[in-house]
Image: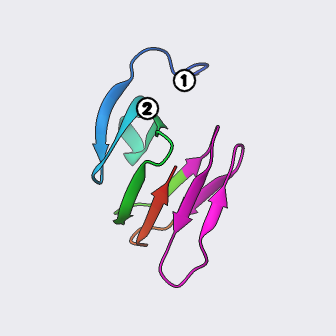
Amino acid sequence: MTTFVLEPGSAWQTVDVFGASMEKHAVFEGAYDVRSAYFKMAAGCTIEPHHHAKWVQVLVLSGEMLVTQAGEPDRHVGPGQCYFVEAGETHGERA
């Protein structure tokens, strides 16, 4: 069945993501080993260097993310831009 998510709605919850507190609205968590969610990070919120067991896609809707990765130049990602992190790649982020 096709699922349409037109707005994140009101199901926001405070979560800890690698030591950073932010708001999360789950969109899809189920079959096919796929998860999707919206996250709200306050300006200055920092996620310390970490890695994921699976690849991750981040789409910035507003504001800006600074993405850091050892051996790579820091990157600024703004509204409408996205980035992908391969499984196992250590990276950090700051809103």
Look at the image and say whether residue 20 sits in the magenta stretch: no
Q: Is residue 62 left or right of residue 10?
A: right
> Is residue 87 shown left or right of residue 82?
left
Q: Closest to the observer: 12 or 29?
A: 12
At label 1, the amino acid type is Thr
- Most distant residue in the bottom direction: 71
The residue drawn where x is 43% and y is 48% is 45
Using the image, determine if residue 71 lies above or below residue 55.
below
Could you say where residue 17 lies in the image, as x and y percent from the top left? Answer: 32, 48
- Check residue 76 for magenta coloring: yes
Query: Is 64 drawn above or below residue 66 in the view shown?
Result: above
Q: Amino acid at mark 2?
A: Phe
- Disc 2 crowd rating (10 Å Cα; few below 14, some 14-19, many 20+) is few
x and y percent of residue 43 in the render? 51, 43
Furthest residue to the front? 44
Q: Horizontal placement of 50 versus 71: left or right?
A: left
Q: Are marks 1 and 2 in contact (CB under 8 Å)?
A: yes
Q: Which residue range is magenta in the image?
A: 58-84
Residue positioned 28% across, 43% down in the render: 16
Q: Which mark is residue 3?
A: 1
- Relative vertical location of residue 93 with respect to residue 87 in this rendering, above or below: above
Q: Secondary structure at mark 1?
A: loop
Q: Earlier in the sequence, mark 1 or mark 2?
A: 1
Residue 28: give its label. Answer: 2
Residue 95 x %, y %: 52, 49
Residue 41's place in the image compared with 58, above or below, is above
Q: From this viewpoint, which residue is outermost toward the top?
A: 10
| Residue 62 in which image quadrant | top right
- Horizontally, is 21 left or right of 57 in the view? left
